Image (spheres, rainbow, N blue to C red):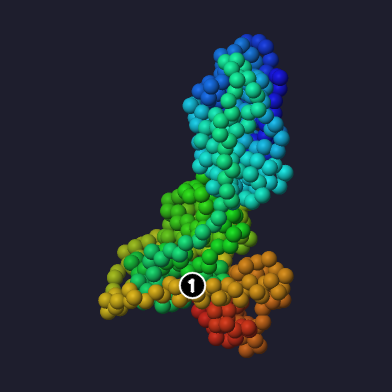
Amino acid sequence: MNFAKTKSAQTIGLGAKIIDVEIDLSKGLHSFTIVGLPDKGVEESRDRVSASIKNSGFTSPKSLNQKVVVSLAPADIKKEGPIFDVAISLSYLLASGEIEFDAKNKLFLGELSLDGNLRRINGVLPIVSQAKNEGFTEVFLPKENAREAALISDIKIYGANTLKEIIEHLNTKQINKKSGTAVVQTKKLEQQPKTEIILENEDAIIDFSEIKGQETAKRGLEIAAAGGHNIAMYGPPGTGKTMLAKAFSHILPTLSFDEILEITSIHSVAGTLKKDIITKSPVRAPHHTASYVSIVGGGAIPKPGEITLAHRGVLFLDEFPEFDRKVIETLREPLEESEISISRSRGTVTFPANFILIAAMNPCPCGNFGSKTKECVCKPTDLLRYQRKISGPIIDRIDMWVEVSQINYEKLSVDNSEKKETELIKERVIKAREIQRERFTTAGRKIKTNSEMSAKDINKIVDLEKSAMEILNTSAKKLDLSARAYHRIIKLARTIADLDNSKSIKSPHILEALQYRPKRNQ
């Protein structure tokens, strides 16, 4: 046999594509060629595969005078990374006749070290999901990826430490071609059991009770968590803005199974998966010096950025105006559409980006503008430049603007350590989310929070009392609100009403929502 084919796969965006790995052997001077738009990482698999096969007890392709051609199809898709190593090795051994097995409905993934060990790879979860959809019944991959892959049910997952273990599991050949001796079948690989998700109760690292005062900010964060609203906190340094943001993630509701799969897939593709599974809402806090690509995503083959890694979680941008203006303006699309589109010469990739934005900022570069006790040392031009970094369209897309001011020193000495404020807030948030879920289910909408409602949803679903409508319209004229800001106030008021367990939006709910608009003009 001089030809063989196995199946592998690679990620494209946040999805996956099954790849045919074909090998043809012919007589002639030794050569080892890989075709099918391989990148440098794929081309280097020639050396990894040759050494791994030799160190697994078989004949190295480099030791024979033969022409080896590896084709990765379809040929018009750029292939990247070492994920094809295992499939290439098995295809070669099949084509050379050293092993025999039925490759039908089997998928092979993994990077090989020179001694034949398998190394962890990225993007396993979306690949296994795609394999299941296309009718594959077995997946062979590195042991370190097995628990992640086993999140997908109804497909057999086999985790291996070495290439030799996979060969011994699959090989049905009775005579070893190299040694001429009988092949002794050793132990088979054990199928990875389905991964059960265990949600552990974790005490908040920072409880809201540890943050003295700032009741307005705490209330704002509770509303933001309940309705999925974006919030900006502004005030002088050292008033607790960062602590409030860190405590925020602990009042978010528990993730559903589908959300866990979605988040884990994203981080698997991005290579940021530190554990097998992500069971808590992600919190991303990039530094203000982070590059545009690291925040938004991109590259020759687009990869997710911080905006997408925060999907179903929190994106915390401290020192908000210090971020590059290009980065700040790019937030327009995800804050409005809950997704980000990245265009490159090879096409456009759309990544999900449904997160809660928490922005924190000082009133000026030195932090003392407007202070009654400290003098602002900023030049007028610096102050103007600082304020102009945040444009009107971005201000419009942030639902809540909350001042975090200096607090009295007497409050700092109050001991609230016994009070578990975070638990109480989380209970109210979960109850409000349940009310929203029931409302959207009844209306036949596949959205989860009030912040996701469209203008059509507002007209169809939201019950606004006449007195509340009059207050809103009067205020909208006085504040010269844009249409976007007008609708965001209604959505915010709907969340406040949900926390109040009110079926309709009443005047107090609208009045509170209006208080969270920025003090400067829209």
Q: For this rendering, which residue is in front, 290 or 389?
A: 290
Residue shown at the point (63%, 84%) measured from the top left: 504
Q: For this rendering, which residue is in front, 317 or 470?
A: 317
| Visible residue check, residue 404 | no
Q: Name the amino acid, label 1.
A: Lys
| Visible residue check, residue 435 | yes
Residue 26 in the image: state x and y as whole percent. 69, 15
Q: For this rendering, which residue is in front, 120 or 252?
A: 120
* Other residues around mark 1 within 10 Å, as few (<14) / some (14–19) / many (≥20): many
Q: Count up the numbered dots.
A: 1
Residue 33 in the image: state x and y as whole percent. 63, 21
- As drawn, the residue found furthest toward the bottom would be 467
Quadrant location, the C terminus: bottom right
Residue 345 position (above or below residue 404): above
Residue shown at the point (54%, 37%) measured from the top left: 160
Residue shown at the point (57%, 41%) measured from the top left: 190
Q: For this rendering, which residue is in front, 365 or 137?
A: 137
Residue 250 in the image: state x and y as whole percent. 46, 66
Residue 380 position (above or below residue 352): below
Residue position marked by numbered label 1 in the rendering? 426
- Does 424 sit left or right of 192 as displayed? left
Residue shown at the point (71%, 22%) measured from the top left: 3
- Does 450 sit left or right of 202 as displayed? right
Residue 23 in the image: state x and y as whole percent. 67, 24
What secondary structure is marked by label 1? helix
Dividing the picture into quadrants, the one containing residue 330 is bottom right
Dividing the picture into quadrants, the one containing residue 258 is bottom right
Quadrant location, the N terminus: top right
